[in-house]
Amino acid sequence: MQISTDERDAFGVALNEATLHGVELDVQQRVAAVTLEVLTLPESGPAPPDARIQLILRPVGRVAASLRDGSWNDPKARVVPFRVEDLTAVVDSVAGLNIYGWSFIDVHQEEIAKWGDRLSLDWQAGPDGLSHSLCLFQESRQHFDLLVWFDELRVFDPAYQEISISEFLASGRRWWEAFRSHDPRTRGRGLASLRRSDA
């Protein structure tokens, strides 16, 4: 699977301020499932009542994570090791918060440079499954960083109907464009846009 620079940037838009709900990893099949609630709008009509999506990543070549008892910028925070079998439970214990920053795809080099010396988990499967990466994090009473390397990515809705990559990216872009234009469909998400007079 090829991900262009434009698509990588569009993923950043589509995933920005998404809520992380869970991560599952099948080590035998080398498949990861990431469940997120995203900011999305159709071409017309209201926002969907259930905005969860699931990213299916395969084959997965590596999973690196850092779970620390402290804030993201505390170099002395205790690193909490865990087994790959415990990944879902660990994510469940810290999940439910937004991810943000506009960059989530293929930023592994920058991320590993920040916390790669404080790994809780570094599972590696083989020479393939390393074409791309997905970066996630959660900041609660503990800080959690996660990188999943993969070759292919697919997107599914709550009914497990596949959404094309192009439509998924367009839906995220529509939400942010609507947000900037003060579209009432984007209200109630805890985000505030500058008034036009303040811009």
Image (cartoon, grey):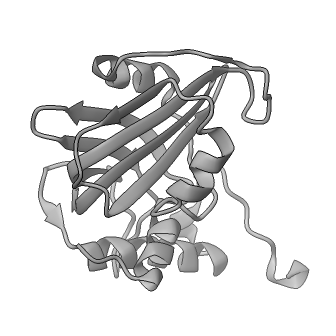
Residue in the picture at 59% in, 39% down = 116
Q: Name which quarter of the figure residue 71 lies in.
A: top right
- Please state if 186 lies on the left or on the right of 171 as rendered: right
- Please state if 119 lies on the left or on the right of 21 as rendered: right
Residue in the picture at 31% in, 56% down = 130
- Which residue is more in the foreground, 108 or 42? 108
- Please state if 157 lies on the left or on the right of 88 as rendered: left
Residue 151, above or below 21: below
Residue 48, above or below 7: above
- Which residue is more in the foreground, 139 or 25? 25
Q: How many labels does the image show?
A: 0
Spot occupied by residue 67 in the image (x, y as percentages of width and height): 56, 24
Q: Name which quarter of the figure residue 171 lies in.
A: bottom left
Residue 79, above or below 128: above
Residue in the picture at 37% in, 39% down = 63
Q: Can residue 191 be seen in this view?
A: yes
- The residue most toward the right is 198
Spot occupied by residue 107 in the image (x, y as percentages of width and height): 53, 60
